[in-house]
């Protein structure tokens, strides 16, 4: 959990397996930023949440399954993020000139906006 105001916690699963299994919650609170770097996030049964903080999908992050929720979810500039079989209960801002890839079943119960 990222929970220190003004600070960023970077998660980088690109080590030996390149995959992080999330069966619980990856969460940003208290004005902190949770940065999900390049790699696969097996989020089936899990939640990625901004709860008073911000979640940023960075540099080729790929989320598979689960739920993305919260009011401050962003895809950072010059990066691409990909989502497979994900439910969005979130306000998502997608930077202009980036890829926001979706495949499989995507349920959008929130707002996905492309910024310019």
Image (cartoon, rainbow, N blue to C red):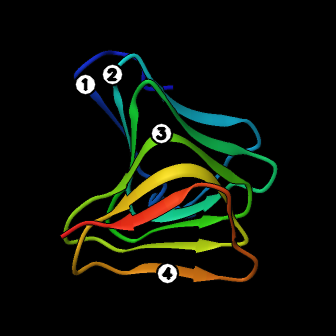
Q: Tell me if mark 3 has few (under 14), some (14-19) or many (20+) residues whose alpha carbon lies within 10 angstroms of its own.
A: some
Residue under label 3, please give it.
71
Q: How many marks?
A: 4
Percent across and percent down for residue 51 are 51, 27
Q: Residue at x 46, y 58 (%)?
A: 15
Residue under label 2, please give it.
31
Residue 57 figure quarter:
bottom left
Q: Are marks 4 and 3 in contact (CB under 8 Å)?
A: no
Q: Secondary structure at mark 3?
A: strand
Q: Tell me if mark 4 has few (under 14), some (14-19) or many (20+) residues whose alpha carbon lies within 10 angstroms of its own.
A: few
Q: Residue at x 73, y 55 (%)?
A: 66
Q: Secondary structure at mark 4?
A: strand
Percent across and percent down for residue 89 are 64, 49
Residue under label 1, please give it.
7
In space, the residues marked 1 and 4 are separated at their CA atoms by 28 Å
In space, the residues marked 4 and 2 are separated at their CA atoms by 27 Å
Which disc number belongs to residue 101?
4
């Amino acid at each position: 959990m990222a929970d220190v105001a003004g600070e960023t916690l970077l998660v980088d699963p690109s080590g030996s397996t390149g995959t992080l299994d999330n069966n619980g919650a990856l969460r940003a609170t208290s004005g902190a930023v949770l940065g999900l770097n390049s790699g696969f996030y097996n989020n089936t049964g899990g939640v990625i949440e901004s709860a008073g903080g911000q979640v940023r999908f960075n540099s080729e992050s790929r989320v598979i399954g689960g739920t993305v929720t919260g009011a401050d979810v962003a895809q950072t500039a010059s990066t691409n993020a990909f989502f497979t079989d994900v439910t969005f209960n979130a306000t998502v801002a997608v930077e202009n000139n980036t890829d926001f890839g979706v495949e499989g079943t995507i349920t959008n119960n929130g707002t996905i906006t492309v910024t310019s």
